[in-house]
Image (tube, rainbow, N blue to C red):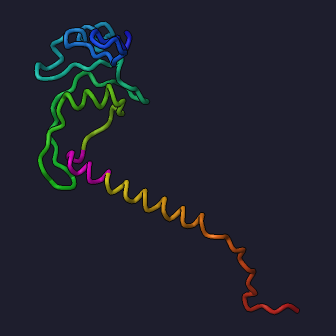
Amino acid sequence: MTTRRKSRKSGRVVPYSPGREERIRNLIARGLIDDGSRIPDDAIPAAVELQEPRNTYSPKLFYRDKDFLCRDCGKPQTWTAEQQRWWFETAKGTIYSQVFYCRDCRKKRREQAALHRLASQAGIERKRAKPSVPKKHRNRGKTAG
């Protein structure tokens, strides 16, 4: 199955995302499920051909909303089935991924990491700009002779 198709409106190549029935037919054809009854009605069936397998025994068969508490702020959040579909099929996240931080806390963490990266790069540039002076050998209290 192809993972890209041409858009009808613009003619550009866009990512391909099959519908629910086609996803279920693909899972049955691959022998991963016997019939569609294994996929809950409130779940999005997975397109396993779009997932990125990395030493996994079995792919995700469907995505369902998952509730979690943010590790930083403690707010209850939901990782929606649609967000999971995007993560596993478009962003090619590892199958064993879990979400631990809410969107606001993830944004703060990314901003902090960017500041740390800038500070580190500035330190490296300062070090490179200094003229290097060769170190003198020290006579550590020993006398020649």
In the rendered image, the vertical position of residue 64 relative to residue 14, given as above or below: below
Q: Residue furthest front?
A: 10
Residue at image x 22%, y 13%?
A: 19
Relative side of 114 to 84, left or right:
right
Percent x, y of residue 33: 25, 13
In the rendered image, the vertical position of residue 142 relative to residue 112, given as above or below: below
- Report how many numbered discs are placed on residues in the image: 0
Residue at image x 31%, y 29%?
A: 88
Camera-side residue of 51 and 2? 2
Percent x, y of residue 103: 21, 45
Q: Residue furthest right?
A: 145
Residue at image x 54%, y 66%?
A: 126
Camera-side residue of 107 and 55? 107
Percent x, y of residue 99: 25, 42
Quadrant assignment, res 42: top left
**Quarter of the image that includes the C terminus:** bottom right
* Magenta part of the chain: 100-110
Residue at image x 18%, y 37%?
A: 79
Camera-side residue of 119 and 88? 119
Relative side of 11 to 77, left or right:
right
Whether 108 is among the magenta residues is: yes
